[in-house]
Image (tube, grey):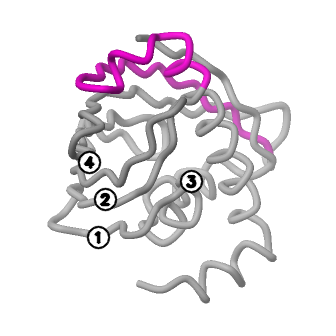
């Protein structure tokens, strides 16, 4: 499955880049995220709960950043296992460009996702719909985290 989107974010390109590389902000922004731990530079361990169609599971996985070109782009590769629910793995190419003013950024991303187990059995339409919902929730929380109110939340987030 391939997902391609462009998001407009009311923040400078440097602030968006900073947020995309901040484990605390990412933990707050990822729906159902329980842990977002730094394992080594540009490698993270993630635990999150997700419901995709009738399948609800707790996923444990790893994320690695590569092709890093601050503050313009990077590649995110990740994989996770959800027990009997199955697995998901994917790669995302993310690029940032200045918007119509210095406090506006356009983020383009292209994600290729593969799922297996029960997740693969529920059908691509349900998986695609769930992925879109998770993406929308992520960007809503991510935008909030880039505001002054979000900075307060970031300080309260457990490590």
Q: Could you tell me how far apart the alpha carbons at marks 4 and 2 are, in whole angstroms?
A: 7 Å
Residue 121 lies in the magenta-colored region: yes
Marks 3/4: CA–CA distance: 16 Å
Q: Which residue is mark 4?
A: 63
Mark sitting earlier along the chain (3/4): 3
Name the disc covering residue 31, or none. 3
Residue contact at pointers 3 and 4, CB within 8 angstroms: no
Closer to the eye: label 4 or 2: 2
Q: Quadrant of the C terminus?
A: bottom left
In percent of width and height, residue 42 lies at 23, 56
Q: Nearer the viewer, mark 3 or mark 4?
A: 3
Q: Nearer the viewer, residue 126 or 71?
A: 126
Circle 3 — which element?
loop
Residue 35, quarter of the rendered image: bottom left
Q: CA distance from mark 1 to mark 2?
A: 6 Å
Q: Residue sitting at 30 percent across and 37 percent down? A: 85
Q: Earlier in the sequence, mark 4 or mark 2?
A: 2
The residue labelled by disc 1 is 37
**150 on left or right of 86:** right
Which residue occupies 46% across, 31% down?
A: 94
N-terminal-most mark, 1 or 2: 1
SS at mark 4 in the image: strand
Question: What numbered label is drawn on residue 46?
Answer: 2
Of residues 26 and 61, the one drawn nearer to the viewer in this rendering: 61
Q: Residues within 10 Å of mark 2 (few under 14, many from 20)?
A: many
x and y percentages locating residue 117 in the rendered image: 24, 25
Query: Marks 2 and 4: in contact by CB < 8 Å?
Result: yes
Q: Position of residue 5 (x, y in %)?
A: 62, 20
């Amino acid at each position: 499955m391939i997902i391609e989107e462009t998001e407009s974010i009311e923040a400078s390109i440097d602030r968006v880049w900073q947020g995309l590389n901040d484990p605390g902000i990412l933990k707050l922004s990822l729906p159902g995220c329980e842990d977002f731990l730094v394992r080594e530079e540009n490698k993270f361990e993630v635990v999150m709960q997700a419901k995709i169609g009738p399948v609800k599971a707790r996923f444990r996985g790893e994320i690695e950043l590569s092709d890093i070109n601050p503050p313009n782009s990077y590649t995110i590769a990740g994989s996770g296992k959800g027990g009997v629910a199955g697995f998901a793995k994917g790669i995302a190419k993310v690029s940032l460009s200045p918007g119509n003013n210095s406090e506006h950024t356009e983020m383009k991303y292209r994600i290729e996702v593969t799922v297996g187990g029960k997740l693969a059995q529920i059908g691509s339409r349900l998986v695609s719909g769930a992925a879109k919902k998770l993406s929308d929730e992520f960007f809503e929380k991510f935008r909030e985290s880039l505001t002054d109110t979000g900075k307060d939340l970031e300080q309260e987030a457990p490590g």
